[in-house]
Image (tube, helix red, strand yellow):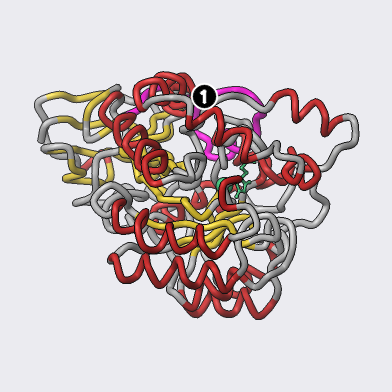
Amino acid sequence: MDRLWTNARLATLTGDGLGPVERGAVAARDGRIAWVGDVADAPDAADIVDCAGRLITPGLIDCHTHLVHGGSRANEWAMRLEGATYEEIARAGGGIVSTMRATREMDEEALVASALPRLDALLAEGVTTIEIKSGYGLTLDDEIKMLRAARALGDARMIRVAATLLAAHVVPPEYKGDADAYVDLVCERIIPAAVGLADAVDGFCEGIGFSPQQIARVFDAAKAAGLPVKLHAEQLSHLAGASLAASYRALSADHLEHIDAADIAAMAEAGTVAVLLPGAYYVMRETHKPPVEALRDAGVPMALATDCNPGTSPTTSLLLMLNMGATLFGLSVTECLRAVTVNAAAALGLQGEIGTIEVGKAADLAIWNTSEPAELVYRLGFNPLHKRIKDGLCT
Ligand code: DI6
Ligand code: FE
């Protein structure tokens, strides 16, 4: 073995719960988990790290972010404090379109440089995998530029990046009044060009985004390109986007404040993960909560993510999302921790690779300055990370 972390309390996240090992050890070889079990049976290793009773979890996974973007929307947010609504600002040319303008003005290098501090904030909390969406370019070249910037972030830091094409985010101003022509561009040119750069295709199914019929066309093109799909669905209204996503066996449907029973049944049947985004719910001062009890009862796996974006969720704290998932949405500690590990891995189609401490998976771990899992959920604005391990290496 290359390295053994011993004398730890493990939350392996295997099985239905936290998969605890009270006096545990984990060994890595060639960047992979090679052994997990009780301290008493631990193998020998070139390097032995005494964890002094600390908790080890899988490295955290932020499965929904818009980390790459230009500009800031602090002033719009201030206008919302004065009473303007998100939709009013969007219809007046602000909102996503204002971030689009700022993003188009930046080259790949500048986008990477501006995203790095946000990425570093997530790394500091033990995040070892992040999903990053495009969606603020809205031309062929600008969407590809965003995907390249996302990939470059994965080279700049020790982190796995899953890049998602979100060209169907909003209709760009040059296609105003002709959304279908923009959908043609997305389907015929942008999706084929993203093959090899994007790991999945996403869309925004909403009155200010795209209709279910338009999203279906995007999903058909994704399917033809061999890319899995996911969807921003039922965030502000109910359009049954989650059911549509499930009918395409989507990896995830995200937001879901306005989801109904039929959507939930469809997601359960398809194995589509419900990605809940309490940061957006909080910043938007939503009052309609995603129906966590119904999702739980139906056995839909739930994930939590930052939705880090300049408009509705300007946060870079996944740990804060754990607290909000519990306090605002009623998730248990176990559900919160599953939501940023095993279920977040499934939301990215990476459940065979990351998300649990299991032999054969990537040796991506977070070691915490506590032995108590509830500590990760309970605190607001305190970071108990001791060490982050990526592919078996201490970072
Ligand atoms: N839903 C969101 O919460 C973000 N995008 C989306 O489709 C918001 C993006 C923004 O306001 O910039
Ligand atoms: Fe989003």
**Disc 1: which residue:** 384
Query: In terms of secondary structure, where does tag 1 sit?
Result: loop
Magenta residues? 370-389
Q: Give the quadrant of the N terminus.
A: top left
Residue at x 59% of width, y 79% of height: 265
From the top left corner, tell me how far across and down residue 224 is, in percent.
31, 71
The verdict on residue 385 being magenta is: yes
From the top left corner, tell me how far across and down residue 263 is, in percent.
62, 75
Would residue 68 be found to the left or right of residue 313 on screen?
A: left
Residue at x 44% of width, y 27% of height: 119
> Of 116 and 395, which appears nearest the observer?
116
From the top left corner, tell me how far across and down residue 90 is, in percent.
72, 43
Amino acid carrying label 1: it is Pro
Would residue 320 be found to the left or right of residue 149 on screen?
A: right
Q: Give the quadrant of the C terminus.
A: top left
Is 208 situated above or below 250?
Answer: above
Would residue 330 be found to the left or right of residue 104 on screen?
A: right
